[in-house]
Structures are given as structure tokens and as C-alpha cells.
Image (spheres, rainbow, N blue to C red):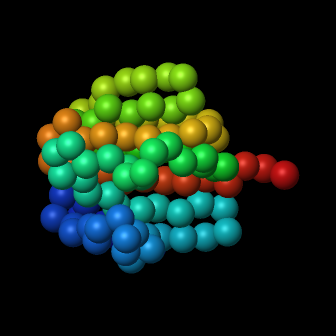
């Protein structure tokens, strides 16, 4: 068992994102993400995610684009999506918990 306090947890910058993994198995991984206002993830344009993804917005507000869908999400909201091309931008300083879940073979 692992107990996490997401509100007080610090995240490393995108270049060190591997250090933000809170829990990892062969089936899923949990990561903490922090974005400053105007910062994009990934910074160089959309990335293809081959996993299902769940984002919980711990604090702040984002705009997220997944394939051709576009949405805004704020504190205590969740974004749940199938594999696709992802990019998000922080509308204000934001902290997110991301969960990636492998597709079944």
C-alpha cells in the first residue's frame, strides 16, 4: 500500500518526468505533473499515447486536446480517455495526477 498527499507533493520538470512516477506496475503507472501558467505538455506538440489515460486535476485549470476533442478542466475534475494524440496547456498554475493504463492484448 502507498499513501500519497497530492496537494503537498512536488513534481520535477518535464525533462526529469521519470522522477514523477509515484507508482508503477506492468499494467499501469501513476505520475504527478505540475505545469506553470501557459506551459504545455508535451512542450513540442501533441504526443501519441498508446495507453488509456486518466487525469485528476488536483489544483489549477487546463485546456486539453485529445485527437479532435477539446475541453477545459479544473480542480477536482477528471479527464478519462482512450489512446490518442494528447496535448494540454495550463491556464493557471496546475497540479495533475496522471494514470496510464495499458491496453489489453
Residue ranking furthest to the right: 105
Whether residue 2 appears in this view of the structure is: no
Q: Is 103 displayed left or right of 88 in the figure? A: right
Q: Is 53 displayed left or right of 64 in the figure? A: right
Look at the picture and state if 36 lies above or below 46. Answer: below
Q: Residue at x 38, y 24 (%)?
A: 71
Whether residue 77 appears in this view of the structure is: yes
Estimate the x, y position of residue 90 in percent, counting from the top left.
24, 41
Image quarter in which the N terminus is found:
bottom left
Look at the picture and state if 57 lies above or below 11. Answer: above
Look at the picture and state if 97 lies above or below 15. Answer: above
Q: Residue at x 16, y 45 (%)?
A: 37
Estimate the x, y position of residue 45 in percent, counting from the top left.
45, 45
Front one among 72 and 45? 45
Estimate the x, y position of residue 97 in percent, counting from the top left.
36, 53
Place residue 91 in its image quadrant.
top left
Q: Residue at x 18, y 52 (%)?
A: 36
Front one among 17 and 58? 17
Q: Is 102 displayed left or right of 30 in the figure? A: right
Q: Residue at x 60, y 47 (%)?
A: 48
Look at the picture and state if 21 lies above or below 42. Answer: below
Amino acid at each position: 500500500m502507498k499513501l500519497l498527499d497530492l496537494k503537498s507533493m512536488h513534481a520535477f520538470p518535464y525533462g526529469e518526468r521519470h522522477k514523477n512516477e509515484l507508482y508503477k506496475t506492468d499494467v499501469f503507472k501513476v505520475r504527478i505533473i505540475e505545469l506553470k501558467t501557459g506551459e504545455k505538455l508535451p512542450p513540442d506538440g501533441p504526443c501519441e499515447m498508446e495507453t488509456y489515460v486518466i487525469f485528476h486535476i488536483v489544483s489549477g485549470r487546463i485546456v486539453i486536446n485529445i485527437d479532435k476533442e477539446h475541453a477545459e478542466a479544473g480542480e477536482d475534475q477528471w479527464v478519462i480517455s482512450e489512446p490518442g494524440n494528447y496535448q494540454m496547456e495550463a491556464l493557471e498554475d496546475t497540479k495533475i495526477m496522471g494514470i496510464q493504463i495499458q491496453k489489453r492484448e
